[in-house]
Every structure is written in structure tokens, then in C-alpha cells.
Image (spheres, rainbow, N blue to C red):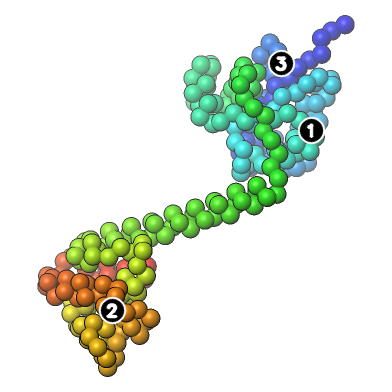
Amino acid sequence: MGRVPELWAGTDAGKAADHCTVIDRDGTKALSRRVPNNEPELLELVGEVLARAEDGPVTWAIDVNVGGGALLMTLLASHGQRLLYIPGRTVHHASRRYQGDGKIDAKDAYVIADQAWTLRDVQPLQEWDEIAVDLKILTARRYDLAADRTRAINWKRAQLLKHFPALERGFDYAASKAALVLLTGHQSPPGLRRIGSRRLGLVEEPQHPWLPGHGRCGRRCGAGPAHRRGRGENCCGCGQNPGQGRCWRWA
């Protein structure tokens, strides 16, 4: 009675297509095929690999656990298949020990399958529940928004540093909304000098307060130091007008 075949299927996942390589106990290729990342073609691939296994165990391995590999992961989970996650960094370092130059999908798929056969400390991927997926999506979105805000603030500070360094270091733009409100109207020393301390709301009962009219108290938000810094700078550097225009749009 012959032994039951055991197969390891490594998949190099991509956005448009996946490349799957199947090896046996001896490391011999039993299958190597590029498959479009569509459900019918992936189901056909799963059926073909299971048919080659002849009811023997099949260990699947993939190099990504999100994005392009999500559809294949879902299909394998619905078929009760054992799936391992081999990180791309592991595949990159391990591929140096295999023949062949360059990074090609077929080689990476073979490396993934061989690593799944070789490594004994890789834990199978567990199917995610809906709550965990929702939390992951919301957390990623919150991280993106925070990164966008930090990037925008750093860009504004870099622009201010070119033509008004005193104002750049005078505010904490990440914590002060009033500082951003001030930038929507005045981003340069001449602009702060023209508006004057009265309209900035630094004196009692101004006739036409600009900053208090935008919902911010000039004295409490630090407009006084900004006005004094504006009076202290009189030179106009190259690119000041385009720079302050960009600060206005981003603020």
C-alpha cells in the first residue's frame, strides 16, 4: 500500500493574479500555475490541488494576510484548509538560498511552499470574526487621518519657517485651533502689521475684531506674541507670497 501523498502549496499573492506552486515531500514540483485573482479560477485551483493530494493533507501558505490574498484566504477557510502565513521578509531572505536570479512570482511561490514544509514553528492563520475586522478597518482609518493631519501641520510649519520663522516657533499648531484660524487670514509679518492689535482682539471693545469674530479670543490664543513678531520682521524673502498663499489654503 503506497503512502498517502502530502502536499505543500505556496502562493505568491498579487492584486491581479496569484502564482501557486505545489511541492511534495521530496521538494518536487507537482504544480506551478499562475491564476487570476477571481473566485471561479481560484476555486478551480483549490479543486485541482486537492485532487492531486488524493485525500491526503495539504498545507497552504501565503505571503500576505491582507489585500490581494484576502479572497484566497476566504475560500480556503470555507473549504476547511490549513493555511500558514509566511511573511514577505522571510521569503525575501530565504530566496537567496535558492537557485535563480531576480524576483519572479514562480520562484517566490516555490520558496513559500518550501518554507511551509521546512519551518515547524509557523502557526496557522485563524479566521477573523466581524468585530475584529471592523476594529481593524476603523483603526487603520484613524491612523490614516492622524498621519494626514501630522503631515499637513509639518508642511505648514516648513512653509512658515521659510518666510516667518518667528511665527512658526510661536505656536503649537497641533494643539491650537486659534493658530490655524489666524493663518487663514494672516500668514506674513506685513499682514499682521496691517491688521493691528485692535482688530486682532488684543484690546477691549475693538470696532471690528477679526480673530474674536472667528470665535477665538486674541489675548488667550497667543495673538499678542504673533503681532509683536510681525512688527519685528520687515524683510520680504523670495517666495514669501506663494508660501503664504499655500499656508492659507492648507489652514
Mark 2 Cα within 10 Å, few/some/many (few <14, many 20+)? Answer: many
In this view, the mark in front (3 or 1): 1
Helix, strand or loop status at disc 2: helix
Image x and y of residue 161, in percent: 23, 61
Let me know if residue 246 appears in the view.
Answer: no
Mark 3 Cα within 10 Å, few/some/many (few <14, many 20+)? Answer: some
Distance between the Cα atoms at labels 3 and 1? 20 Å
Q: Which residue is drawn at 49% across and 19% down?
A: 96
Q: What residue occupies the far bottom of the structure in this picture?
A: 207
The quarter in which the N terminus is drawn is top right
Helix, strand or loop status at disc 3: loop
Residue ID for mark 3: 24
Disc number for residue 218: 2
Asked if labels 1 and 3 touch by Cβ distance under 8 angstroms, the answer is no
Image x and y of residue 190, in percent: 18, 77
Decide: is 77 above or below 106: below
In this view, the mark in front (1 or 2): 2
Asked whether 80 or 95 is in front, the reply is 80
